Amino acid sequence: MASSAPLHVPQKWRRPVRQRSRLVRRTGPAHARVEFAHPSEQEFARFLDYYRIRWVYEPVSFPIGWDEDRIAEMFTPDFYLPEHDMYVELTTMKQSLVTPKNRKVRMLRELYPDVSVTLLYRKDHQQLLAKAGYGSIEVQNLRKQDIGDIVISPVELETRVRSLATKISRDYRGRSIVLVGVLKGITFFMADLARQIKVPFVIDYLDLKRYAGAQPRERVSIARDIDYPIEGRHVLLVEDIVNTGLTLDYLLSELRQRNPASVEVVTLLDRPTRRLVDLTVRYVGFQIPNDYVVGYGLDYRELYRNLPFICTLRSSLYELGAAAATPPTVN
C-alpha cells in the first residue's frame, strides 16, 4: 500500500514531472488545438478562452503516494492558469469519481503547501471568474448574450498600463508633469496609470460638451476647465479612446494656447483606421477595431463602466437603442 501522506519523503522524490504536450494542431482557437481526455475539459477550455484566461492542459504530475522508495501514485491536475498561478481539477457528476479527486487534492495540498489548487464543480465557475477578475459580469443587467467578445482581459489591462507608466516615468525623468484627464471614461485608466507613474505629478480634469454643429470645431467645447495653471509645465492629456481625432485636435489646440512647456497624449484605446485629423498620440495602450466597446471606464448609456475588462457589445443592443436616441460618439 502506498503511504497516505508521507511528509518525511525526501524532497527529490516530490519533484513534479512535466507531461508531454497534448497539442494536436497549431491553428484555430486554443481549445480546439488540444486532445482532451473528456468533453467536459474541452468545454471548460472553451469557457477560459471566451474570458481570455490563459491556460495549460495537464502540464505536470505531482507524486502523492510512495511504496518505500518508489513512486506509487501521481496526481495530474487538469489545468494550470499561469497568470493566477493556480491549478484546476474538474469534477464530474459521478459521485464515485468526486471522492477520490477530493482525496488527491487534499494530499496535494498537504505535500505541496505552496501549490494553489482548486477542485472545480460546475457551480463553481462563477467563483473562479471572481478570482480571475471577471466577477462583475452580472452587473447592471449585462447579459452574457449581450457581449460579443472579451477584447482586453484584466491581466492584459494591468500589464499594459504598468508598461505605459514605466515609459512615461522614463521619458519625464527629472521633471514633473500635469496629468489632465478627459472625463469620464478615463476614470479607472487614469487612477491605475497614476499609481504606477514614478515622477512628480499633479492631477486635474476637464469635461467636454458636444453639439450637432455644422463644422467640426463647432461640435465640441470645454464644459469644465482645468483649475491648475499649465503655463511652463509639461502636460500629459489622458484619454480613454481616440477615434477621428477631431475632439483631441480641439483640446490640444486649446491647451497649447496656454503656453505649456509641452503637451503629449496618452490614450488607453486607439482606432487609427477612423482618423480624420493628422495628429500624433505618443502613448497608446491598445489599438482596437471599430466595434463598440465598454468596460474599464467606457460606457453605453452610462452603464458597464465598472466591468474589469473591455468587451464588445453585440450590435443588436445599441442598434435597438438608436431608434430612440443616437448612441454617443467619442473623440
Image (tube, helix red, strand yellow):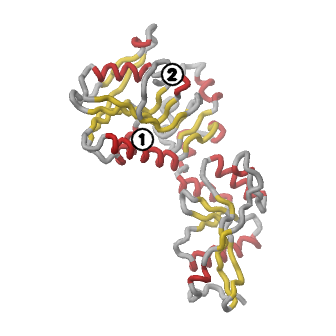
Q: Position of residue 172 (x, y in %)?
A: 30, 40
Task: Kindly identify the residue that appears in the image at 68 percent across and 74 percent down.
Answer: 75
How would you rate the neighbour count of disc 2 (Cα within 10 Å): few for under 14, some for 14-19, many for 20 or more?
some
Q: Position of residue 329 (x, y in %)?
A: 50, 22
Q: Tell me the number on the disc at residue 188.
A: 1
Residue 30 lies, with reference to residue 124, above or below; the image says: above
Task: Kindly identify the residue that appears in the image at 64 percent across and 75 percent down.
Answer: 62
**Nearer the N terminus, badge 2 or badge 1?**
1
Secondary structure of residue under mark 1: helix
**Three-letter residue code for mark 2:** Arg
Whether the residues at callouts 2 and 1 have beta carbons within 8 Å, the answer is no
How would you rate the neighbour count of disc 1 (Cα within 10 Å): few for under 14, some for 14-19, many for 20 or more?
some
Work out which quarter of the rendered image holds the N terminus and state it: bottom right
The CA span between labels 2 and 1 is: 25 Å
Q: Position of residue 184 (x, y in %)?
A: 40, 32
Report whether residue 89 is seen: no
User: Residue at label 2?
Assistant: 275
Q: Position of residue 158 (x, y in %)?
A: 47, 48
Q: Quadrant of residue 246?
A: top left
**Three-letter residue code for mark 1:** Phe
Of tags 2 and 1, the one toward the viewer is 2
Q: Who is closer to the viewer here, 43 or 27?
A: 27
Residue 118 lies, with reference to residue 225, above or below; the image says: below
Q: Who is closer to the viewer here, 230 or 224?
A: 230
